[in-house]
Image (cartoon, rainbow, N blue to C red):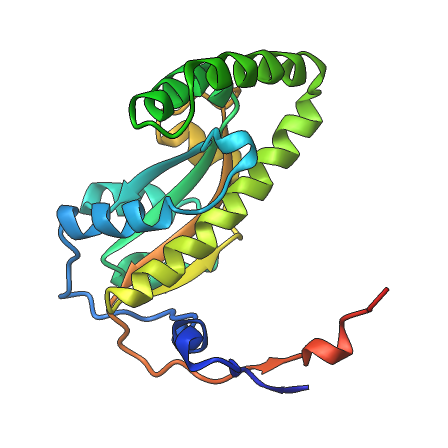
Amino acid sequence: MEIKRVKNPANKIMQERRTIRKYNPTVKISKQEMSNILQDALTAPSSLNLQPWRFVIIESEEGKKLLSSHIMFNQLQCETSSAVIAVFGDRENFTYADEIFSAAVRFGLITEENKRSALEKYEAYRSVFTDERIKDTLLLDGGLVCMQIMLAAKGYGYDTNPIGGYQKLELTEALGLDTKRYIPILLISIGKADEEGHDSIRFSADEITQWV
């Protein structure tokens, strides 16, 4: 095992990212900058490019008060962060397939024939997807975009903390979302650190890798 380090200096943002629990409460991230962070994070890959991620930005005093009753042991992050990003997966992401592929046609990325072929395949996939498989896919895609959000935030000079310990169903309901449609994935607190992040131990790649 070793201290968390990257081999390639070009990847230093991965090394510099720290889990931060206490933020400077006077620092507020503007809506434009928050949108920029999310836009950068949306370069993440997703299954069939359906991009099922949906976000709720909790930043107002009212919103944080609502959140605080559902996050159990993470009160400090809630109170001091600029915002908390609630990440959800949309079970109905398939309904956007035509819109996504039509845009790809307009931008010259694919042909109309390619679009029709892809949509036919999507419909075939969708017909055999179980509820469990849909959920697994949303959790996978959600994990990809969550990591991108944390790295993008660091690139803008902000720090983050992924929060998995919260009342997921209850918070989804409290935010007014349809619990049958939206699957809660993760909360990410974001702000300007008011504490020093610390190094942590990582396995070396050799310790956890097999070559076949």
For the question of whether residue 182 can be seen, the reply is: yes
Height in image: 128 above or below 170? above
Using the image as rendered, state which of residue 29 and residue 68 is in the foreground.
Answer: 29
Using the image as rendered, state which of residue 62 and residue 36 is in the foreground.
Answer: 36
For the question of whether residue 71 can be seen, the reply is: no
Asked which quadrant contains residue 150, the reply is bottom left
Q: Position of residue 124 (x, y in %)?
A: 66, 13
Height in image: 23 above or below 180? below
Task: Tell me which residue sits at (17%, 56%) in the image.
Answer: 29
- Residue 122 vs residue 163: left or right? right
> What count of labels does the image hold?
0
- Residue 126 vs residue 192: left or right? right
Which quarter of the figure is the C terminus placed in? bottom right
- Residue 157 vs residue 16: left or right? left
Q: Where is residue 95 in the image (x, y as percent from the top left)?
A: 46, 15
Q: Where is residue 202 in the image (x, y as percent from the top left)?
A: 62, 79
- Residue 68 vs residue 36: left or right? right
Asked which quadrant contains residue 111, the reply is top left
Q: Where is residue 156 in the image (x, y as percent from the top left)?
A: 24, 64
Asked which quadrant contains residue 67, the reply is top left
Height in image: 141 above or below 48? below
